[in-house]
Image (cartoon, rainbow, N blue to C red):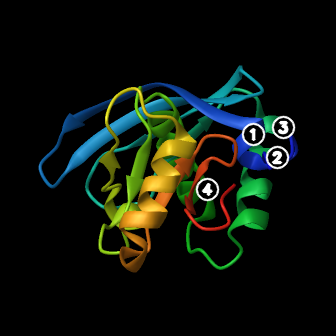
Amino acid sequence: MPLPASHPHQRYSVSGYQERPSGDGFAWSCDLLRHGQSFGLVSDDGRGGSADFTFTDTARGEEFLAAARRLHPDADRPADVLVDELITVRQMNALDQVAYCFEEDRFEESGEHRLAEPGLTFEQVRETLATRYAERRPRVWDRNRSAMVPVTGAG
């Protein structure tokens, strides 16, 4: 079942993502969009601190920050978490192949994932993973849910 239109992963997105090496990691920046309309910019200098937000539409910016707090009430920096998720959604949905991961992969921490052979459908990959690799607790990227979902019960 797809996420409702009111979910932040449906309402917000990013565009123009760019990254470059920095002293300690990668610096990055991207535009923030609400239903395809730009309302701000977010960037990170790659030194481990919080992301910097610049809102061109203050009301939309406050709405975004409130949505992040509701979605991630226990996070130290909920807006940073939401932006990371939106970047991941954009990158994963842009793939030509079906992405998946196993329990030992560090998808949530570092984005580690695997790609199925070209031409295989979501259902074909899900079925193969469920029958051949069930003990490794596979998950497959579901574009409708904007998330890695378990291959059992993902139908």
Q: What amino acid is at disc 2?
A: Glu
The numbered mark, 4 or 1, whose residue comes first in the sequence reads 1
Marks 4/1: CA–CA distance: 15 Å
Q: Please tell me which of labels 1 and 2 falls first in the chain.
A: 1
Q: Determine crowd level at label 1: few under 14, some 14-19, many 20+ residues with C-alpha closer than 10 A.
A: some
Q: Which residue is mark 1?
A: 10
- 124 sits left or right of 48 in the view: right
**Secondary structure under badge 1?**
helix
Picture layout, residue 6 above or below residue 81: above
Residues at circles 4 and 3 in contact by the CB criterion of under 8 Å: no
**Residue pictured at 46% horizontal, 47% vertical:** 125
- Residue under pointer 4: 79
The label on residue 59 is: 3
**Which residue in the protein does label 2 denote?**
63
Type of amino acid at the residue the image marks with label 1: Gln
Examine the rendered structure and indicate whether residue 115 appears above or below residue 112: above
Q: Are marks 3 and 1 in contact (CB under 8 Å)?
A: no
* Circles 2 and 4 in contact, beta carbons < 8 Å: no
**Secondary structure category for the residue under label 3:** helix
| Distance from Cα at disc 3 to Cα at disc 1 | 18 Å
